[in-house]
Image: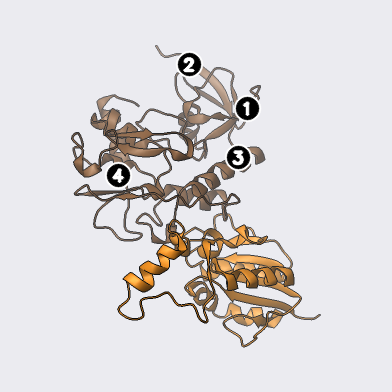
Amino acid sequence: MPQKISLRIDGELIHTAGQRSILEVALEHGKFIPSLCHMKGLASVGACRLCIVEVAGVGRVLPACSTPVQDGMAVTTQSDKLRRYRKIALELLFAERNHVCAVCVSNGHCELQGLATKLGVTGVRYPYTFPKIGVDLTHKKFTLDQNRCILCTRCVRVCAEVEGAHVWDVSSRGVGSRLVCELNRKWGESRNCTSCGKCVQSCPTGALAEKGFAVEEMTKRTEPISRLTALRGVRP
Amino acid sequence: MSKAKVATVWLDGCSGCHMSVLDMDETLLEVVKRADIVYGPLVDAQEFPEGVDLTLVEGAVSNQDDLKLIQKIRGRTKLLVALGDCAVTGNVPSMRNGIPVKALLERGYVEGSDVNHRPPTDGVPALLRNALPVHEVVRVDLHIPGCPPKADAIAYVVMEVLAGRKPELTGKVKFG
């Protein structure tokens, strides 16, 4: 029988089962915690750092997606400090690549853009890096635009954990990190890609898209993938 | 009470933000009741005047002229507002930034042209190495992102500033 625990989130007393993340429990109780790399049904990796929360008695902020709830925990999801840090994390994501929203297939449907609006990011205080990075158009159905990639690794995880093909990975380190297809093959030359499109649907930005869509036209749906994982019993 | 002085300026952008300013419709009448529009593509002033209260800047800083003008404007403006994505992020003009200026001009004026086959030199200012968002060149007091920003957002900001309040744009604007 799963362990029953009690904790407080923003002062509200919540009873839940153990072995769940703060993010899952908070979202279930109607709290708003921003996140980009989290996707229901996939393993959490704590890559985007937007879901940071404060836990009483812990001297640093913790990512809600990869911190399990514990009995007696007191979690704060909204504070000036958290809002400030979340804005910094978002701005750094914008500064790191060329997110030219105006000419992006996902303009208007992008999770990064949407969170900027919601969290009040109207400008980026850090110098833009304007990296020169490419676009891979070799796949017959899909496109990869590294300029929009935020390295959330949702595509990596959905391909490995759900489709079982493990086409995607991340190479290099730091700002040099890049999403790569099978040890740096062109996507069109991939030997394992099943062209299922789960990576495209999971991508929160316009980095992965279907061919044939113009600016603002690419909408995505993650719910069918989350439902599939629940049906298979991979994850709740 | 004397009227406030408002200016607009068009740097490296498509003028879409100025179209959005015009889209404020009847709010423009409210604006001109409280302020004089003293400089910009919509009025006939040749020199950017001293003592401007509010300047809306459209476009990225892309060439020597943009650079000199924005520095002059900063010195003569109380509240400088970056209007639209080109001014806020660099946007489309900044997509050239990965390409060296010489190669860029050759691509446009030599490879891409049937006549002349050389980049223009007379009467055009030299390009800067990168097209930059305004705040990377001078201090910016407020950003209104959008491509273009919604007329409602511009109207809200201008009216709030003229009323002496600080506009709060969370949830009201988006990039792109």
Looking at the rendered structure, whether the residues under marks 2 and 4 are on a common chain is answered as: yes
- Marks 3/4 in contact by CB < 8 Å: the verdict is no
Element carrying mark 1: loop
Nearest to N terminus: mark 2 or mark 4: 2
**Separation of marks 2 and 1 at Cα, in angstroms:** 26 Å
Q: Residues within 10 Å of mark 2 (few under 14, many from 20)?
A: few
The colour scheme used to paint the residues is by chain
Q: Which residue is mark 4?
A: A200
Give the colour in which the image draws chain B.
orange
Q: Which residue is mark 2?
A: A4
Nearest to N terminus: mark 2 or mark 1: 2
- The chain assigned the colour brown in the figure is A
Q: Which residue is mark 1?
A: A60
Q: Residue drawn 35% across and 76% down? A: B117
The N terminus of chain A - image quarter: top left
Looking at the rendered structure, whether the residues under marks 4 and 1 are on a common chain is answered as: yes
Give the vertical position of A202 relative to B64 (above or below).
Answer: above
Looking at the rendered structure, whether the residues under marks 3 and 1 are on a common chain is answered as: yes
Comparing labels 2 and 3, the label whose residue is closer to the camera = 3
Image coordinates of residue A209 in percent, x first then y, are: 30, 50
Left or right, residue B117 beside residue B25 = left
Nearest to N terminus: mark 3 or mark 4: 3
